[in-house]
Amino acid sequence: MEKTFGILILILTLTFQSCTEKEDDLISQNCESDCTEIIGKLMTDNATVPIVDRKVTVVWDNTSFGSGVVRTKATARTDSNGGFYLKFFIRDDELEDGLHRMFYDKLDNDEFLSADLNGIPLLQIGRDTMLTRNHNVPKKAFLDLTLLNLNDFQQGDYFWTNFEYIRPVGYSQSIDGAIHGWTNEFDSNQLIELAGNQPIAIEIVREVNDIPTRKNDTLFINAGTTSNYTVDFNN
């Protein structure tokens, strides 16, 4: 039964994919009036270092469950400052249905944290408009986290760590943080991937015997390196 169900899901997936029609409307970049313009930057290291020569694409996505039309509207490459400029004309049907999305060529997963920015929706978009879209992609760093006294964790207790990657002003990010919940079933040593070369705000939350406590801290880890950090369940 499970095998049959799996085969059915595969068939449905392939069917939906086969119903997706891809169109090329790059000629819309030649528009001279009522154009939509997008300017922005693709950066890393807390928006201080540009990501250069990276392809940026805007598509109109009018699909549902993998069926429909995906229309390529414009492409550009980031310059030496990480900047890009896109211009295109929005068709009548694109004003009525679907959603315009921005895609970037995927970055190296070994260097960057959450390196895939694909599918960013472009909201409040229309003809004769200019949008600014700046994006920061954190590089990858590591935290050797030591959790003390996990054996004291009891049923009904609550214990988690929240690592928030503080985004640069005026920028969105490919990832904004990581939340981890801990119990006595976890090993006391955990190696965690975090954002490097930018500030991290740490929130440690416990609830023991129905008494909640919170502790805040900050952290900065150089990209590609590992830092040590200790959290005590009892303190």
Image (spheres, helix red, strand yellow):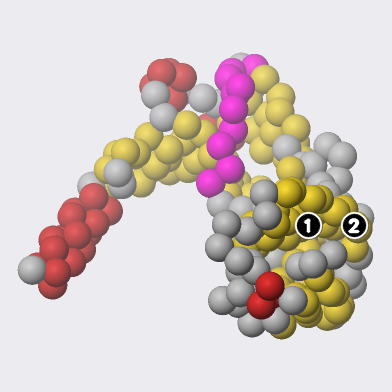
The residue sitting at 85% across, 54% down in the picture is 215
Please tell me whether mark 2 sits on a helix, a strand or a loop: strand
Give the amino acid at mark 2: Asp
- Mark 1: which amino acid? Ile
Q: Which mark is residue 24?
A: none
Mark 1 or 2 closer to N-term? 1
Q: Which residue lies at the image location 44% right of the left edge and 25% below the top edge? A: 94
Q: Estimate the x, y position of residue 75 in percent, counting from the top left.
A: 60, 46
Q: Position of residue 82 (x, y in %)?
A: 81, 53
Q: Give the number of the mark in front: 1 or 2.
A: 1
Quadrant holding the N terminus: bottom left
Instruction: Report if residue 61 is visible in the image.
Output: yes
Q: How dense is the environment of label 2, judged by Cα within 10 Å: few (below 14), some, or many (20 and up)?
A: few
Q: Are marks 1 and 2 in contact (CB under 8 Å)?
A: yes
Nearest the viewer among 19 and 113 is 113
Q: Which residue is mark 1?
A: 204
- Quarter of the image for residue 229 reads bottom right
Q: Residues within 10 Å of mark 1 (few under 14, many from 20)?
A: some
Whole-percent x, y for residue 81 in the image: 87, 53
On screen, residue 212 versus residue 119, left or right, reads right
- Figure quadrant of residue 158: bottom right
Residue identifier under label 2? 217
* Residue 153, image x, y percentages: 65, 69
From the viewer's perspective, is residue 205 above or below residue 152? above
Q: Is residue 223 above or below residue 73?
A: below
Left or right: 16 in relation to 222: left
The answer to which of 98 and 164 lies nearer the viewer is 164
Q: What residue range appears in magenta? A: 119-128
Which of the two residues, 131 or 112, is positioned nearer the viewer here? 112
Measured along the vertical axis of the image, is residue 39 above or below residue 105?
above
| 142 in magenta | no
